[in-house]
Image (spheres, rainbow, N blue to C red):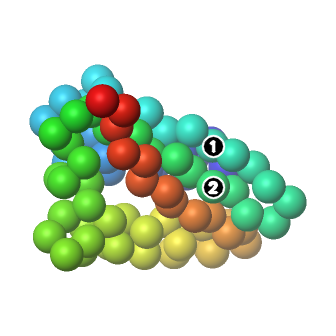
Amino acid sequence: MTDLRTFIETIAKALVDNPEYVDVREISGERTTVFELRVGEGDLGKVIGKDGRTARAVRTLLNAVSAKQGKRAVLEIIEPEA
């Protein structure tokens, strides 16, 4: 599922002001793969969007791409550490 990791990373880097701080970690489970997305301070709002619309759109795209591959993927957006 590394191509899904790259997919998420590419979208996140396009949304934020500091793409060098984008980090996507992949945690593979039995049936589901969880992707943890971390961004730099101040960029969290850009990834989540107004009322969570951007995050919802990214999750929808991820679900469509992973379903096409016959897999299940979940995106977790992690707050940056202060």
Q: Residue at x 49, y 65 (%)?
A: 62
Q: Which residue lies furthest to the front in this view?
A: 82
Q: Residue at x 43, y 33 (%)?
A: 23
Q: Are marks 2 and 1 in contact (CB under 8 Å)?
A: yes
Give the distance between the C-alpha atoms of the residues marked 2 and 1, in whole angstroms: 6 Å
Query: Can you tell which quarter of the image residue 13 is in?
Result: top left
Residue 14 can be seen, yes or no: no
**Front residue of this view, candidates 51 and 75:** 51
Q: Could you tell whether 77 is left or right of 75 in the image?
A: left
Dot 1 lies on which element?
strand
Q: Position of residue 68 (x, y in %)?
A: 62, 73
Circle nearer the N terminus (2, 1) = 1
Identify the residue position indicated by label 2 in the image.
34
**Front residue of this view, candidates 36 and 11:** 36
Q: Quadrant of the C terminus?
A: top left
Q: Residue at x 51, y 59 (%)?
A: 75
| Picture layout, residue 80 above or below residue 61 | above
Query: Can you tell which quarter of the image residue 42 is in?
Result: top left
**Front residue of this view, candidates 45 and 24:** 45
| Picture layout, residue 34 above or below residue 6 | below
Q: Could you tell whether 73 is left or right of 22 in the image?
A: right
Identify the residue position indicated by label 1 in the image.
26
| Picture layout, residue 40 above or below residue 70 | above
